[in-house]
Image: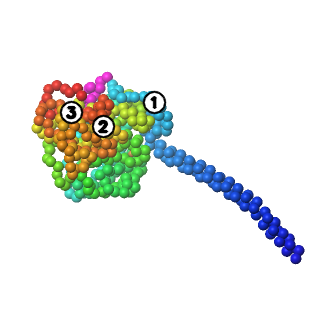
Amino acid sequence: MASYPAATHRIRASETSSGAFWMVATMLLGFTVAVIGFFALMMWADARESRDAAAQPAVESAAATGGHDHATDQNVALPLNSFAGVVPANATELAEAHKAYDATLPPAPAGDLAKVQMTLKDMTVEVAPGVKYNTWAFDGHGAPGPIIHVREGQMVEMTLKNGGAIPHSIDFHAGRIAPNVAFKDVAPGKAIKFRFRASDPGVFMYHCGTKPVLAHIANGMYGAIVVQPTQPLPAVDNEYVLVGSEWYLNGDGINEPASLAMTKARTRMADWVTFNGYANQYVTHPLTAKPGETTRFWVVAAGPTNNVNFHVVGTLLDRAWVNSDLTQFQRNVQTVLVPAGGGAVFDVKINDEGLYPFVSHAFADVDLGQVGLLKVGNPQGTMSH
Ligand SMILES: [Cu+2]
């Protein structure tokens, strides 16, 4: 019995203190939520940091040789060192000695299956006369990678071997394929093989899609794939492939090779802008046509950021397949935008002998090397553009 009242009392006591209990419990709960929230925030920040750290080696290795600039620099305050247009004294001889990237469209393979094999390689190339740059190159080409030419409907079988020092990948704008399967990172020493049907005709960019993509494209990891339509385009006499791109240097590249200046890439401060990877190479080594011939340009703007405002001085673009839509073309237009990551096809028929510059009509880019010549016939003299 004695316990009963006591028990009753205890019950009563706990009943009477339940208000205070819940108040304390609520406070504790609030405190616990705050503590958990705090730790969740810390873990998120940590994860973010380690993700950023994971993305860094690629860029740091790019900057390792030059050392002036690297991707971890968050300070983008100007001025940055510009090496725009800086060449050695013997630049003219060097430009003449340079072997120009062959812009000629190669033939497409016969049959249903087009096998493409590339090995990635870190290599130093020239991007302007006497200006050396450390690229991450597709198939030992420097930049751009090899021109791929297939036919609409063909199966493309891509084999990519990574002979470089860090993970890379290959992303085809011409493909309709799950990128997480086909375009995934390939570790150094490893390879990937995948297939896609070239169901859409046109000219398309391919590039490395490994993060940070800005760094991988800026280091030369891009190229063009031409998918020839089943319904043929009008016959032409000459076909050239031009890939526009720009370079961001952490040094002048003259005494020692330059590497990527990531801060300049982010702030769009190009040192050199090129067709097929080398400034002004088709000024010194012009593309050619005979008077009265029609020349086709398959143009890709690889960027990483710049567009190409394609224009041929001294004529109009007789046919312009804008955005690489081969179902229709515009006639007799002056300048057509090829956006970064896009492509377009242009035909020009030139009757009069002469030197006809092709440019990106954003003239800052011409100043930095994005100009070439179409030499029609055998004209005398030179062109100053
Ligand atoms: Cu890459």
What amino acid type is highlighted by mark number 2?
Gly
Q: Residue at x 22, y 46 (%)?
A: 321
Q: Earlier in the sequence, mark 3 or mark 1?
A: 1
What amino acid type is highlighted by mark number 3?
Val
* Magenta highlight range: 89-98
Q: Secondary structure at mark 1?
A: loop
Q: Which of the numbered marks, if any, corresponds to residue 277?
A: 2
Q: Position of residue 249 (x, y in %)?
A: 39, 33
Q: Secondary structure at mark 3?
A: loop
- Is residue 263 visible from the viewing direction of this image? yes
The residue beneath circle 3 is 313
- Locate residue 347 relative to residue 50 in the image: left or right: left
Q: Earlier in the sequence, mark 2 or mark 1?
A: 1
Above or below for 236 versus 353: below
Residue 14 included in the magenta stretch of the image: no
Contact between marks 2 and 3 (CB within 8 A): the answer is no
The residue beneath circle 1 is 78
- Locate residue 270 relative to residue 153 in the image: left or right: right
Q: Earlier in the sequence, mark 2 or mark 3?
A: 2
Figure quadrant of residue 8: bottom right
For discs 2 and 1, the disc positioned in front in the rendered view: 1
Above or below for 96 versus 202: above
Q: Residues within 10 Å of mark 3 (few under 14, many from 20)?
A: some
